[in-house]
Image (cartoon, grey):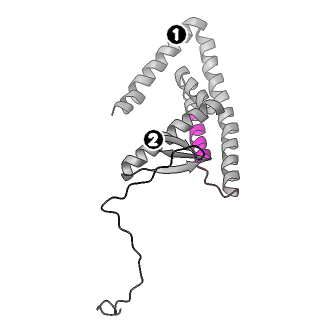
Amino acid sequence: MPLLVLLLIVVPIAELWAIIQVGQLVGLPATIGLLLADSLLGAWLLRSQGRMAWRRVRESLAAGRLPASETADGALVILGGALLLTPGFITDVLGFLLLFPPTRALVRRRVLRRAAAVGARTVGGPAAWTVQGVRWSARGAHTRRGGRQRRRPVREHDVEGTAVEADRRELGGSAS
């Protein structure tokens, strides 16, 4: 609920305040021009950065790698473009940060780290996966070289064994 309140009430009020402040500083026509220019630039950046992200996903798939970071980049580009197309200066700044590759990489790392933590809580164990040579887990990133190796402790409910195919007749049931 607090995130919903933030998105639906606080952000629009902050945007209106920022638009009014800019309007008082530079005038109404310049403010409208700035908002229009932001939206047009955002649409252009969304198109160009989206194409680059899609190309990286295809290259990663062609190389036989899982495109995890490329997919996250694509999602962040779409979010950044949507923020730029939304009228307002605060959302425009956030949108530009998501479309600018260095800041998008910072956000991507945080998003992947958060996803690993949520996965660990949801699954109930140490969720981990490797993205571009970095092992992500609920505790953060660990490089393959120099990273600590951790073994999962054996729990009482862990069972090791083998499965074999059984026929119903062997089990005493009727064959169907």
Determine if residue 100 is in view.
no
Query: What amino acid is labelled 2 in the image?
Result: Arg
Instruction: Identify whether 82 is placed above or below 25.
Output: below
Residue situated in front as seen by the camera: 134 or 97? 134
Q: Taking 75 as reference, is 3 left or right?
A: left
The image's mark for residue 165 is none
- Asked which quadrant contains residue 162, the reply is bottom left
Q: Is residue 55 visible?
A: yes
Q: Is residue 99 magenta?
A: no
Q: Is residue 78 above or below residue 156?
A: above
What mark, if any, has residue 21 been given in the picture? 1
Taking the spot 46% from the left edge, 40% from the top edge, the residue there is 114
Q: Position of residue 142 (x, y in %)?
A: 54, 43
Q: Residue at x 61, y 51 (%)?
A: 67
Q: Nearer the viewer, residue 106 or 18?
A: 106
Which numbered tag is attached to residue 139? Answer: 2
**Residue 164 image position (x, y, % from top left):** 41, 81
Write the residue at 47% across / 14% down: 17
- Specify the segment rendered in magenta: 63-81
What is the three-letter code of the residue carrying label 1?
A: Gln
SS at mark 1 in the image? helix
Q: Of label 2 and label 1, which has the lower sequence position?
A: 1
